[in-house]
Amino acid sequence: NAGVTQTPKFRVLKTGQSMTLLCAQDMNHEYMYWYRQDPGMGLRLIHYSVGEGTTAKGEVPDGYNVSRLKKQNFLLGLESAAPSQTSVYFCASSYSSRYTGELFFGEGSRLTVL
Amino acid sequence: GQQLNQSPQSMFIQEGEDVSMNCTSSSIFNTWLWYKQDPGEGPVLLIALYKAGELTSNGRLTAQFGITRKDSFLNISASIPSDVGIYFCAGQSLAGAGSYQLTFGKGTKLSVIP
């Protein structure tokens, strides 16, 4: 089983460029999430989705947009990248029940903005 | 928002020693979870606790859901080199309208000296 797959794994951008991170899960999970991880900051929630066609803001949503057109995919977009968005991004998914805390994470996408 | 205080931030231990780490909060949670992140990978769920006072083991790992519902601890017995990584606690609470909110601690970085 692939679980949660993120692409790309690594990307270098120049300030002002745009890009999209793709997350795909094959577990038929309702909920999907995008987190960023920075040294000493732990995991911070950017956006999440509780089902196909729905998205919601998390703790640090500014500068990011998301879409969930298909249940298995959750896209994270940066319209105009800034150096402050240099980070490791993790996608995760979970069931839609009291077990929503049991997240399945992808391997991460390391983004550097110059 | 809700915050989790996870301690210690980092620890160096000798192989074979036991390890203890904990998370505390001023907020009440109805679920506590512990994740481990290996270097260069995404976090993986170790233990989920759903009832105050619950004590659960997973191999050499033991975690407890504090009776006040405001804290949790994780113990690792007889540490081995592959225990190296970052351990995250997470607390889940109801956010209203049947939805849940998951809050992560900032992590405990564990190093094991052979």
Image (cartoon, coloured by chain):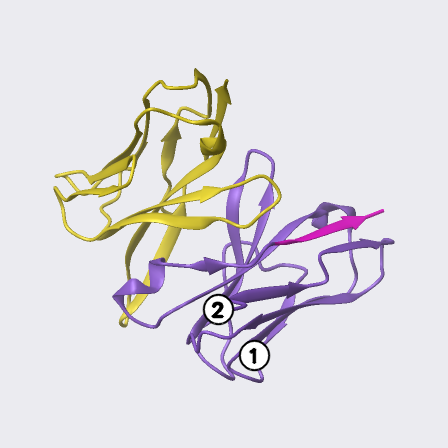
Chain colours: A purple, B yellow
Q: Chain of mark 1?
A: A
Amino acid at the residue labelled 2 = Met
* Labelled disc at residue A32: 2
Where is residue A20 drawn, in percent x and y?
Answer: 72, 68
State if disc 2 and disc 1 touch (CB < 8 Å): yes
* Residue located at (35% from left, 18% from top): B17
Question: Is residue A111 covered in magenta?
Answer: yes
Task: Specify start and end residues of the magenta stretch as a single range.
Answer: A108-114
Mainly helix, strand or loop, the magenta region? strand
* Residue located at (56% from left, 33% from top): A40
* Residue located at (45% from left, 79% from top): A51
**Label 2 element class:** strand
* Labelled disc at residue A68: 1
Is A40 displayed left or right of B23 in the figure?
right
Mark 1, residues whose alpha carbon is within 10 Å: few (<14), some, or many (≥20)? many
Rendered view: B26 above or below A73: above
Quarter of the view holding residue A91 = bottom right
Rendered view: B65 above or below A33: above
Where is residue B109 drawn, in percent x and y?
Answer: 49, 29
Where is residue B69 drawn, in percent x and y?
Answer: 18, 43
Where is residue B68 drawn, in percent x and y?
Answer: 14, 39
Amino acid at the residue labelled 1 = Arg
Would residue A11 be visible to someone looking at this image?
yes
Would residue B106 be visible to someone looking at this image?
no
Earlier in the chain: of badge 1 and badge 2, it is: 2
* Residue located at (48% from left, 27% from top): B81
Question: Is residue A90 covered in magenta?
Answer: no
